Image (cartoon, helix red, strand yellow):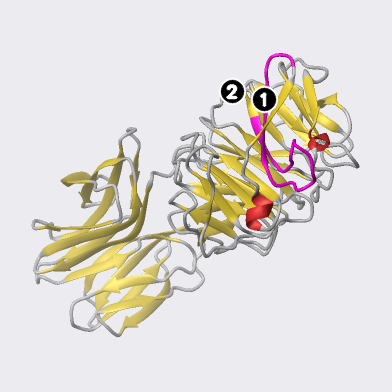
Amino acid sequence: MATIGGVIFAGSQDQGTQRFNGTYGTDIKAATQIIATDYVRLNVTGNGTKLWAEYPNIGTSNYNYYFDNPLTATNATASVNTQSVGNANIQYWVIPTCNWSDPSVNAILMGGGNITGGNTESHLIKLTYNGSSIVRTQYAFDFKANGGSFITAVDHSPVDANYMYVGLKNGKFYYSQDAGTSWTQTSGFTGPTGGFSYGSFIHASRVDKNLVFFSGSGGHIYKSTDGGVSFSDMSTGLPNTFVAQMVLNPSKTLLFAATDAGPYVCVLSTGQWYSMANSTTPNKAYTAVEYVTGENIARFSTYGRGVWDFVISSQILPVSYSSFDVKGKDQQAYISWATADEQDLTHYEVERSLDGVHFSTIQTVKANNKASRYQLIDKNPQEGINYYRIKSNASTGKAEYTAIKSITIDSKGKSIAVYPTLLHRNDPLSISTPEGSYEVVVYDSKGQVLWQQKLTSTVQQVNIPMLSSGVYVYVIQESKGQKVKTGKLMVL
């Protein structure tokens, strides 16, 4: 699957390479076959204007076709039978390919083969369209001789042409930082093996040369932040399935995966995977995914059920919080937060409100742009409820807010904190109180008591059962019935 000029192209089994008629939209689009039989991986070069389509391993043929004018083409401009270059013993139906690092160059990388003869499938081969035909260029390194298996995944960093990556059938991973002259195997690491027909998959970040992901069979995805030198498993929430393809959004906050179990997304700040499927999406294997930059669309192709767009409602700022806390003591508010990662931020603004709606900045803190802990004291909170939030500001001008947290400063100097005030159903609520006897009461929008519970410690987590999505009012009161803190809870 690929998008060129607002038009979607898709490879299909038995139905050739299809060009959808007209630019994409919410309605069903008809398609035109521009070349017949089976087609799989599609690559785009020429600064997003040229198309490559792979005719998979069938018998003694494995063609790569090049289209110079894909928006109007009725046939390919040039083709090459890559299986005739000496890799007649291909063990996968789909031969791994990827775009060349420089998007303006009409070239792709193919993993597997040996143009000097033999059937080792052990070399990288560059395929270049020179204006009239496709030229093959082979890299010297023999992966099978060194790694004990054949190539199942390749990628070439568009950030730095020196960074190249190769995955083998046995799960071994290789990286080069000198444009393929020399290769190093990732020490002490064995990643996913290939699937039934598609091998495995590597995705190098389009904005960070050191960030790379490796996937395949078994429901595991691995992440490297040092250019392949080391990897960590990041598969929490992902089912035990085959991962065909991945793509990262430009802000490096969301990783999308096309899997045999459906479309999935990982929120990188937490490392948690979530299914994107719903009652309207097909229950089929998802075979490819791309991110349509500028439109916040994750586009997935399926096996036999077309192409589906998932609109991402907002871009997440490149900061991941590991904590945010507000506590009251001695008539002052102690505000602290910590980040697991932050990039391209300029500063934070600590904001306070007395009504939970209208906020003003009380202090500005410079961002460190690395995992950090921050803390400050609001020496002049007002009597009653004080609401706080953190605004993170990026160099791009984008901003993001944390959830709102609050404390109560009363005339007796007692301070109470309730957080979070924005929560999902069944999330626990944390309550911090001074010494004494207190209880929490939750009311619905009609003022009816839904739930109440005595607090048995100064810092306590409580679970509020059976709250559906909506807005509720909570009251913290002393056992004698005196209200000392009120506020709103929003349940998503």
Nearer-the-camera pick, 162 or 86: 86
Q: Is residue 128 magenta?
A: yes
Q: Is residue 228 magenta?
A: no
Q: Quadrant of residue 97?
A: top right
Mark 1 secondary-structure assignment: strand
| Residue 278 seen in render | no
Q: Position of residue 230 (x, y in %)?
A: 47, 58
The numbered disc on residue 128 is 1
Nearer-the-camera pick, 474 or 9: 9
Residue at (68%, 60%) from the top-left corner?
A: 170
Q: Which residue is mark 2?
A: 105
Q: Amino acid at mark 2?
A: Val
Residue at (44%, 46%) from the top-left corner?
A: 210
Asked if residue 196 lies left or right of residue 99, the reply is: right
Mark 2 secondary-structure assignment: loop
Q: Are there few (<14), some (14-19), or many (20+) residues within 10 Å of tag 1?
A: some
Asked if residue 335 lies left or right of residue 451, the reply is: left
Q: Quadrant of residue 491?
A: bottom left
Mark 1 or 2, nearer chain start? 2
**Alpha carbon separation for disc pair 1 and 2:** 8 Å
Q: Amino acid at mark 1?
A: Thr
Residue at (28%, 59%) from the top-left corner?
A: 338
- CB of mark 1 within 8 Å of CB of mark 2? yes
- In the displayed structure, 92 sits above or below 63; it is below
- In the displayed structure, 276 sits above or below 296; it is below
Highlighted range, magenta: 108-132
